[in-house]
Amino acid sequence: MELETFNISPDEIEKAMTPRTRAIVLAHLLGNPCEMGRIMAIARRHDLLVIEDACEAHGAEYRGRKAGGFGDMSTFSFFFGHHISTIEGGMLLTDDDECAELARTLRAHGWVRDRSDRDAIARGHPQIDPRYLFVNLGYNFRPTEVQGAFGVHQLKRLEGYVEARRENARYWSGQLAGLSPHLTCHSEREGTRHVWFGYPMLVKPSAPFTRAQVMAHLEEMGVETRPVLAGNIEEETVMRLVPYRKVGGLANARFIHRNAFYIGNHQGIGSEEREAVADYIRDFVVSRDGMVAGKASR
Ligand SMILES: Cc1ncc(COP(=O)(O)O)c(C=O)c1O
């Protein structure tokens, strides 16, 4: 992982590759686009599929092109905290017809009803009622029309939502810059558009407080915090059930897992709330350090 973005590192992708590698799966974490120029070049060079998790990156851009528009497939989540929310739900994009048909089958029990080739498949199974013709394993991931209506309505407002989040992030970055001896904040990399799903921070090991302490303080003040997911997914118990191969020591992922957290960001946060959040963080750090970090004027 890259410490500057918490995203997958193109160098580490190259190191992890074997002749059996088929795909690169990446997440544009917290709305910060991955290094897509280098990643797509690696994919082309080795003939790999690219699957983008753009769940936290609605409207994010890399060199003028939208996150989720590079790979063979990409996913978007519309769960609560996301830029667009249908309460639960999400979207899969692909320009590959075969993937699209497969997705239509998997999302609805494995039956053929939503496939464009359903009649042709049904003709091959005249003994089975085509309404209940199952050709694959499947799930029930069908969104409702009400969710669709929520989503379509918010799509028109997405740009405004993104700008509001970007404005919050600009404010926090300005206000917290003086705390850089102890807290590292993220910034927007050149040529990208960061959409700040949340606002991440990394507590330096030399800081006179721990991540747990600053998170506990913010929670006490009514500001919700989250660790960075997945950080180092290898540390999750579930990984006992997943066969995997590891290349290198995952030092950055471990570091992020232990020391990073984020606060929520949302289009509904107004200037009063974002100022209060910055004050809570600054007051906490100053109280632990004795440093003088005045409020930045803007
Ligand atoms: C990066 C990322 N991937 C995947 C998901 C899962 O999305 P959902 O909860 O809509 O299944 C989320 C949800 O927050 C996410 O942030």
Image (tube, rainbow, N blue to C red):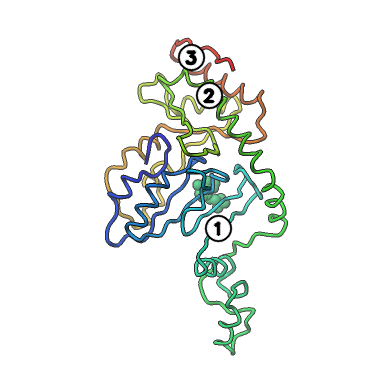
* Residue lying at 38% horizontally and 58% vertically, measured from the top left: 23
Task: Kindly report which numbered mark, 1 or 3, lies closer to the viewer in this rendering.
Answer: 1
Residue shown at the point (72%, 49%) measured from the top left: 153
Task: Determine which residue is flagged by label 1.
Answer: 92
The kind of residue on which mark 2 rests is: His
Question: How many numbered marks are there?
Answer: 3
Q: Amino acid at mark 1?
A: Leu
Find the distance from the CA under tag 1 to the CA under tag 2. Answer: 38 Å
Q: Is residue 51 left or right of residue 125?
A: left
Contact, mark 1 vs mark 2 (Cβ under 8 Å): no
**Cβ(mark 2) to ligand 1 < 8 Å?**
no
Residue 89 vs 219, above or below: the answer is below
Picture coordinates of residue 230 (x, y %)? Answer: 44, 44
How far is disc 1 from disc 3 in space, using C-alphas?
45 Å
Residue 286 marker: 3
Q: Quadrant of residue 277?
A: top right
| Distance Cα–Cα, label 3 vs label 2 | 13 Å
Q: Which residue is mark 2?
A: 217
